[in-house]
Amino acid sequence: MGIWVRVVEASQDFVPLILLTADRPPELLDCGANQAIDQARVVIKYQPLVANLPRVAMGSIAHSTNGQVIPRMLATSFIEERMFLNAWGVEVGMTIMLVSADQIPAKMVLTTVDSAVHWATSSPCGPVHINCAFREPLESSPCKWSSTCLMGLDSWLTNAEPFTKYIHMQLSCTCINACGEMTEILNLIQRANNSLLLFGAIHSEDEMWAALLLAKHLQWPVVADVLSGLRLRKLLTSFPDIERNFMFVDNLDHALLSDSVKGWLEVDLVIQLQYRIQGACGALPYNSALNEVEWEIKFQITAECSLTEPCVAHVMSETLSSESALFLGNSMPIRDANIYGCSWSICNQSISSLMLNSDIPINLMRVASNRGASGIDGLLSTATGFAVGCNKKVLCVIGDISLLHDTNGLSILSQRKLRKPMTILVINNHGGAIFSMLPLAEKVEPCILHQYFYTSHNISIRELCMAHGVKHLHVKTKGELNEALCVAQHEQMDCMVEIDSSIDANASFHSILKKFALQTAQHTMSFLSWIFSHGSIKDDFYLYKIHKMQCSKYRITLSAPPTSASVDDSCKEFYREGFILSLVLEDGSVGYGEVAPIDIHSENLEDAEYQLRFLIHVMEHVDVSCFLSLLKGSFSYWIWHELGILPSSIFPSVRCGLEMAILNAIGNSKGSSMLNILHPPTNENTKCDLPSNVQICALIDSNESPTEVANVAAELIEEGFSAIKLKVARGDDPMHDAAVIQEVRKKVGCQIIIRADANRRWTYQEAMKFSSLVKDCNLQYIEEPVQEEDDILKFCEESGLSVALDETIDNIQENPMKKLVKFTHPAITAVVIKPSVVGGFENAALIAQWAHQMGKMAVVSAAFESSLSLSAYTQFCSYLEMRTLGTFKVLDDTVPPIVAHGLGTYRWLKEDVTPDPRLICRNPLSGSVEASVVSASQLLRDFQVNQKVISCIFAEEQVRRYQYNVEFDNLSCSFEVRETGLKTNDNVMVFLHGFLGTGDDWFNIMKTLSRSAKCISVDLPGHGKSILHGVKGSGEEPWLSLETIAGLLNKLILNIAPGKVTLVGYSMGARIALSMALKFSTKTKGAVLISGSPGLKDKASRKIRAAKDDSRALTVLSHGLQVFISSWYAGEMWKSFRSHPHFNRIISSRLQHDDMQSLAQMLSGLSIGRQPSLWEDLPNCSVPLLIMHGEKDTKFRKIAETMMNALCTGLGSDIHEVVEIPKCGHAAHLENPLPIIAAIGRFVTRL
C-alpha cells in the first residue's frame, strides 16, 4: 500500500522516481504459489510502459538518426513501445522486469538502470519500476559467481560517467512551433490591460528565479502558491523598495469572499506557471483591499489569546530563514500556510552575497509537499527524504492523523543519516479537522462526524517519540510555541513539537477569520467606490501632493489648572500651549491639526517644536494617498517610506497632529469630512440608526470636601451629563477619596455613571483600602489604580472592581498588540485612549479594535486640547461606534451600550484657537450634553485661526549658498558653503559631512535647528562643488592630511563666523571636528561627534588601514566612482543604512562630486590609518563633547564608551556626554534624524 501511494504521488506530481522491488521467480505467478503476485501490474495505471526482461543486451552504443546515444539492442523495443503509447495518448511510466542471474552481463543491468533514469527524468517526469525477480531468498549462503558477467566494464569503472548516455536534442519542427507559440503569447501580453501571474508549485531554484524575473519584467500582480517558494518569501534589507517592483497578492482567497471584490475583477489575461494552485485565482485593479485583508488577518491572529492553527502557520513562517526549508503536510497544514503564512519579513543576508547571484532582492523559500494526490500516507518519511535531498534544516508541519499514518517514519527519522536536524510540528487536534471546514459539518450529527469523519483518537504522541528516541516538546500557548521553536532551532538533534488544538475551536476561529476578512474587503471596496465616485479607478491611486506646511504656536487661557498638573497655590492664571498645523495640498485644500504635548509625558513643547520644524522641511512636495485614512498600518508605512522617518521616533502628540491635518486635508479635497474619509457613507450605513452626536463624560477634580465635590457633581447632572469621572489619589488618604465617591453616589443617585481615575498614584495597599470602601458604590471602573503595572491584574483579582487602562497603553506606538495581549482579564472592562498620547488616530483605532474584540469599552479622551482636536475626536468617536457595531455583528454578540467619551475637558477652555468653537452643548431633544458630529465637521471644514492666541508662525527655512576661497599652507580651496538661520545670530553651528557626502546631507537638520542658531555646512575638499588647488608633494605619500584639512576649515570659520562655533561632524567629519576641538579650543564652543573615532592606537593597524585606503583610492581613479560606491556600501557597516527607504536616493547623490583627484586624495590622506592617534589628548580636552552612535553600530558603540572612559580621567569630565541613537547603524543622522536633533538641541542649550 505504501509503495502504491508513493507511485501515485510521483505520477500525479511529475516527480522522478525509481522504484526497486524484489520479487519471486516469474514461473510462480498465477499457479497458486504463496506470496506470488504480478507486482509489475499493481500500479500499472501510473506507469503504463511495460518491458519484460531479460533481453539480450550487448552493451554497445549506437547513434540514432536524431543524435541520441542509446543501447543498440534496446533501441528498437523501447522507442517502438514509447511511440506506440504516445500515439494512443498514454502517459509515460515504465516497469522493467529483471531476472537476476550471473549469466546476464552486468552491462545489460547498467544499460537498464541508465534507461530507467532517463525515462524517469525525461519530460514529463514520473515513476519507473524495476522489478528484480530472485530465484532464491536473500540469504547469506556463499555461492560461486561467474566473473564473465563483469566483462566490458573496465572503461566505466575508471570514470564517473554513466554507462549509457542520452543526448537530448529538439527537432527543428518543434523549434518552429515553439517560436510561433511564443510569439502568440507575447502578442497577448502586449495587448493585456488587467493581467495576473499565477505561480504554482515550483521545485527548483532556477525556475523560482526565472518566475521572479518574469514578474519583475511584467510588473503584474502575482498570486504565488505556497509550493512556489515565493509565497513565504523573505525581503532583503538592502532593497526596501521591493514592493514597488513586485505586487504579490497573498490573501486573495479571503478577499474573494466579498461579492464587492468579485464585482471589481477585470482580468483579461492570466499566465499560469506550473500546473497546481492551492488557492483561488483572480485580480484586483488595486492591491488595497488585499492589503487591508492581510492586515486584518494578522490583527485577528495576534489579538486571539489562545494558540490557534492559523497562528501556527503565521509563527512558523516567521521563523524560517535562508538556511531552512519547509515541508507541509496535506489537509489543513498546507492550506493554513498558504493563507495565513507570513511573508515580507526581513532577512539579514548581506548585500554582497546577493549581488553575486541576482538583482532581485528576495530570498526564496524551498517548500515541498506531497500534492500529487494530496494523500496523508508517508508524509513524515517523505519529509525526511526531502531533508536529505535539500541539505537544509527542514521544518515539517503535519497533522496528527498524518503522523499516525506514517509512524514507521519515526524509525527512519531516528536513523539520522546524511542530513541536518529536523523540527516536526505536529498539530494534534485528535482527529481530521478539515472535515469541520466543509458544509457537511453543519448537516451531520457531531457523533457521526467524530466517528466516521474526524477519526478521533487518544494516542499519545509523546510515547511514540519516546519509543523511537525522538525529542518531544508539548506546547499549549503562543509563548510556549515560540520558546519551543527557539529551542528546536538550536538543537543538534531532531525535535518533535506537539501542538494542542481542538477541532471545534479551530473551525470557529477559521470562521471568524473569514467573517472579518469579508467585512474588511467589503469596507475597503465601499471606500474605493466612494473615493473614486468622481474619477477613474486607474488614476494614480488618487495621490495628493503636499504644497507646504506651516505651524502656528498658540497659548490659550484655561479657567482652572488641568487635573493632571501640579500647581503652586500662588498661581492665579493657567495656560495651555501647543501648535496648529496648516497643511496645504497642491489643489488648494487645507487641513488643520493640533499638537499639544502634555508635560507629564516623555515629550515637551520645545522637543515637539523641533520635530515640527523638521517635518515642515521633509514634507514639502511629498505625496499623500487617500488610502491613509484606512488606518491599518497605512500611516506608519507612509511615514517610513515617504518621509524616511522611523514612526516610533515621532512624538505621539506630533504624529496625532500630523494625522489630523492630513485626514482633514483629504476630506476637504473631497468636499467632505474626516468622518466620511474614515468611514465612507454607503446605502448599508444609512440604513443603520447611527447617533449623530457623541455622549460626553464630565470631569471633576476631588480636591475639595466630599460635600463640595458632590454638589459640583449634582450641578453637572443638572446641566445634562449622564456620566462623570472623578480624579482621585490627589492627597495622601485613600479614605478621603472613598468618602468623596460615597457622597457623590448618594447625591446623584444610581442611574448616573461614575468613574474614578487614580493616575497610578496609589500603592497596591492604598488601592486595596480604597476598593474595600467603594465596592458598593457601583463604579463603572477605576482607571490605573496602582503604581506598578504588574499589580494591575492582582488588583483585578482581589478588589472585585472593574479597571480601565490609561497610562498603561501610553507610548505603545511600536507593536501595541504585544503589550495589550497581557490585559485580556475580564475585570479590565475599558481602555481610555488619548490619541495625542498613544500616537495618533491609527494607533488609537488599533487599540479600540482590540478592546471591542475583547468585549471592552474604548473610551476616547482629550488631554485638555482646543476645540480643533475636540472636533476631530468627536468624529473619531463616531467612527469607532460604527466599527464597534461591525465587530459585534461578526462575533454575533449583543450590541454594546453607547459610550460616554472623555471630552469633558472643554469646560476648562477659557480661550480657544478658533473664534467660534460651538461644538459641545445640551441636546434639546435628549436633554444630554453631547458633541455634535455635524458641528465638528463644519468646524474643521471652515476652521479659522484665532490670531489673538498665536505667538509665532514658522514655515520653510531658506538656505543661502555661496563659494568662499581659503588659502592655507600653500593650498587653496574654493569651499561650497550653505547657511540657514539669522545672519546676525552669534550662536553658530558648523556641520561637517562624512566621506562621499556633501553639505546637503545636513539640510533638514540645519533648517530644524536654525531657530536657535545660524547653521553652516560646507562641502569638504574634493567633495561636492568644493575645489582644491595646490601643488602635489614629492614622493608617493598623499599631500593631504587631517591636520591640513582642519587648518583650512579653521581659517574658513574665522572668516565667516568671528565668534566661537559648535562643530557637528559625522564619521570623517567627526574626526576632523575632534581634531579641531583639541587644536583650536579657543575657537570651539563644543563638538558633536556622530560615529567618530580618535584614531587607531596600534601602529601596525594604522599601516594596514592606510594600505587599504590607498588601494580604495586607486579604485576610485581607475574604475570610477560608481564601481567604488557599489563596493563601499556593500560592507557590513552599512547594513542598517541599506534598509532605509531612501537609501538608493541618498546613494545616487554620492555620485555628484566635481574633483575626483582630490576625492581620492581625501580617502587616502585622511585615512584613519594616517591620522595621528588622538587618544592621548582626550583627557586634556576642555571643549564639551557630545558623542553619538547608532544602537546597531556595535563597533562605534565600543569606541564611544572607550572615549568616555578616557575623557573621565581628565579635567571637566562632567561636560561630556555619550548618547545612543535607537534603531539605526553607522549613518545615524540619516537613518534616525529626530533623536539626533533632540540631542543636539539639548547639548547646545547646555552650552
Image (cartoon, rainbow, N blue to C red):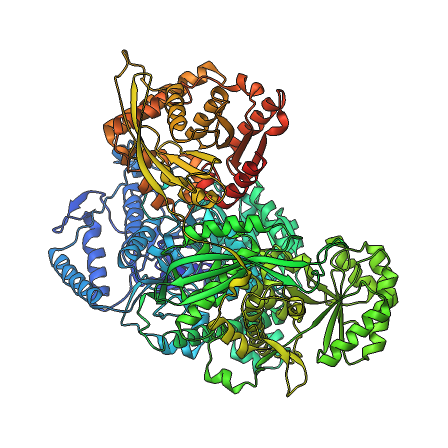
x and y percentages locating residue 461 in the rendered image: 64, 56
Query: In the displayed image of the protein, which residue is found farthest to the top?
Result: 1035
Please report the residue visible at 19 percent of the width from the left and 52 percent of the height from the top: 75
Looking at the rendering, in which quadrant would you find the C terminus?
A: top right
Q: Quadrant of residue 827?
A: bottom right
x and y percentages locating residue 400 in the rendered image: 58, 61
Observer able to see residue 244: yes
Q: How many marks?
A: 0
x and y percentages locating residue 880 in the rendered image: 57, 72
Q: Is residue 6 above or below residue 987?
A: below
Residue 360 or 1109: which is nearer the viewer? 1109
Q: Quadrant of residue 699?
A: bottom right
Residue 459 or 949: which is nearer the viewer? 949
Q: Is residue 1020 above or below residue 49?
A: above
Q: Is residue 976 above or below residue 210?
A: above
Residue 1123 or 724: which is nearer the viewer? 724
Answer left or right for 365 relative to 915.
left
Please report the residue visible at 46 percent of the width from the left and 22 percent of the height from the top: 1075
x and y percentages locating residue 877 in the rendered image: 58, 72
Observer able to see residue 407: no
Residue 811 or 9: which is nearer the viewer? 811
Answer left or right for 921 relative to 970.
right
